[in-house]
Image (cartoon, rainbow, N blue to C red):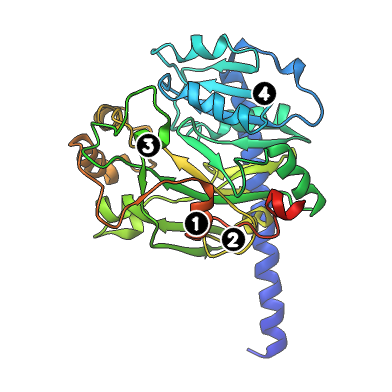
Amino acid sequence: MTGAAARIGGRFRRGWAAYRLRWKRRELLWRCIRAFRQLTPLTDRTSGIRSGDILVFATIRNEIGRLPEFLSHYRALGVSHFLVVDNDSDDGSARLLAAQPDVSLWRTGASYRQARFGMDWLGALLFRHGHGHWCVTVDADELLVYPDCDQRDLREMTSYLQGQNIRGIGGLMLDLYPRGRLDRADADEDAPLVQRLPYFDAGPYRCRVQSPRRNRWVQGGVRERCFFSERPERGPTLNKLPLIFWNRRYVYVNSTHSMLPPTLNDLYDGPEDDRLSCVLLHSKFLPEIVSKSREELVRRQHFNDPDAYAGYHQALAEAPVLWREQSQRYDGPEQLVRLGLMKAGNWCTRDQAG
């Protein structure tokens, strides 16, 4: 093949891939629009959303133990309104959320797995209410932190991003765990998350780019070390794109791990990326993980191929110890910057800004 023919062939392949991705995005957006019919509003306060409000979107099921800190954490960061889908909770989560003046709540009994693990439902709400807003899309077991977040809230952060013409930031989902067995936290139930689960793995983490969407795939950390060491390719995906200035043309593809249009996936290139990034403190390993893993062996709602991960859930149900001598004890966002797990980029500290 001549050089000219190779170039023509390359352009054709790229054009065909872009065409297919455009149709994939339209297909997913249409799924989201249709999925809205599965949602029953319990408290719809979205008429109170104002221009410039920062919004949180989440799907939950039986998260009453996490919700008070979840709400408090994001309110402290400057979030104005929460749009939540409750997937048939029976622990009082819906009652707690319905009583919050800054929460709009929908309920559904439909399959979490068949709704792309809740992303069709959240996509419907993002399409209707997220356009033109900075939107934080997270799970109830994820607390967003970023450089200097204890001093500067999301309003200041998003103003900086807009000034730099940046559409969002990505980051690492960082699993926290206790020192002892998983069925016992390190502090009481009313203690902050980072006291109940104080430890994490500082590495190693690795990132690669996948075609054709250019989505990143970060793996490593404690779950790979303890549960997938023999088959690391089955380890969980740890990169996420939780903070985006939303447009109706956008859609999440695989949880918040990847998006379309594919250029959005270039917002984060893993922990080695020198641009401003964040970390999601992940509280998966609270003591309830033991009973939830036993339940998941029956419900089979959290993986495309549940049989392949039955051993993982069985291991969690036995409440192993994840701690080791190399484990790091969490000491705030500055520590995560020092360890290289998130980066500050040109985002200055308050003292530098002054």
Which residue was labeled with disc 2? 214
Q: Is residue 337 above or below residue 46?
A: below
SS class of the residue under badge 4? strand
Marks 2/3: CA–CA distance = 28 Å
Earlier in the chain: of badge 3 and badge 1, it is 3
- Tell me, yes or no, whether the two marked residues, 3 and 1, touch with CB atoms within 8 Å: no
- Which of the two labelled residues, at mark 4 and mark 1, occupies the earlier sequence position? 4
Label 2: which secondary element: loop
Q: Amino acid at mark 3?
A: Lys
Q: Are marks 2 and 3 in contact (CB under 8 Å)?
A: no
Residue type, numbered disc 4: His
Q: Secondary structure at mark 3?
A: loop
Label 4 neighbour load within 10 Å: few <14, some 14-19, many 20+:
many
Q: Secondary structure at mark 1?
A: loop
- Which residue is labeled 3 in the image? 284
Q: Which residue is mark 1?
A: 341
Q: 246 left or right of 73?
A: right
What x and y, as percent, mark residue 231? 28, 59
Q: Residues within 10 Å of mark 1 (few under 14, many from 20)?
A: many
Front-most of residues 23 and 111: 111
Spatial CA span between label 2 and label 4:
32 Å
Q: Which mark is residue 81?
A: 4
